[in-house]
Amino acid sequence: MVALLVARTGRQLQRYNGVQRVVVGCIPYRLKGSIKASGVEDALEVLVISAQRKGKGMLFPKGGWELDEEIEDAALRETIEEAGVSGTVEGELGKWCFKSKGNDAFYEGHMFPLLVEEQLDQWPEKDIRQRYWMSASKAKESCQYGWMREALDLLVTRLESTPKMLEDLTL
């Protein structure tokens, strides 16, 4: 795990789809309590992180998919670097095209659920980001990107459609 605690930098290995930079990320989640008693929305907690620039809201960890990585490995790497959590990367939730809030660039974004198994005390971006566990509904209110809110809705729908799996995952 020590090798993963240094964030990658630079754009030399970044993947592009035409002119769109390809980014990947995760929605880190955990389940608390009984799903049968409270339902997915109440049992589900997701981890959001602060944006690098102050006052720019909350988001899920995401970053560039590099040429020397599989997509799931890149999503996990970005989540460890930005949020300091690790776990099982599950099946892709979808692909979105979105415009950067900071410039006129367009991006292709892929999101995956990450069932959190480990929360690190130290991680590469600890000094520049805050992380917060919250309900899915609160995360939808605070997340700055519409495409990430859509991905969260898809995760909730997926979890609701697999109740047996959820009972096996509860804390």
Image: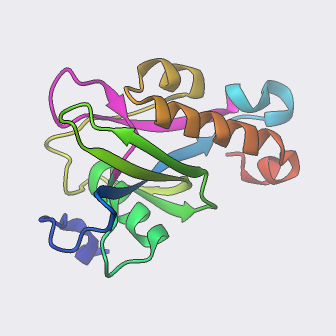
Outermost residue, front direction?
Answer: 18
Q: Position of residue 35 (x, y in %)?
A: 79, 35
Q: Is residue 99 above or below residue 146?
A: below
Name the foreground residue: 16 vs 90: 16
| Residue 65 is covered by the magenta coloring | no
Q: Give the colouring mode of the picture.
A: rainbow
Q: Residue at x 43, y 71 (%)?
A: 73
Q: Which residues are magenta?
A: 43-62
| Residue 54 is covered by the magenta coloring | yes
Which image quarter: residue 9?
bottom left
Q: Position of residue 147 (x, y in %)?
A: 48, 35
Split into 4 quadrants, where in the image is the N terminus? Answer: bottom left
Q: Position of residue 37 (x, y in %)?
A: 84, 27
Outermost residue, bottom direction?
Answer: 68
Which image quarter: residue 58?
top left
Which image quarter: residue 24?
bottom left
User: In the image, 42: left or right of 152?
Assistant: right
Q: Is residue 115 above or below residue 8?
A: above
Q: Residue at x 49, y 26 (%)?
A: 139
Q: Residue at x 24, y 55 (%)?
A: 122
Q: Is residue 102 above or below residue 7?
A: above
User: In the image, 54: left or right of 31?
Assistant: left
Name the foreground residue: 169 vs 78: 78
Q: Position of residue 97 (x, y in %)?
A: 44, 45
Could you tell me how many numbered marks the image carries? 0
Name the foreground residue: 90 vs 18: 18
User: In the image, 91: left or right of 56?
Assistant: right
User: In the image, 7: left or right of 77?
Assistant: left
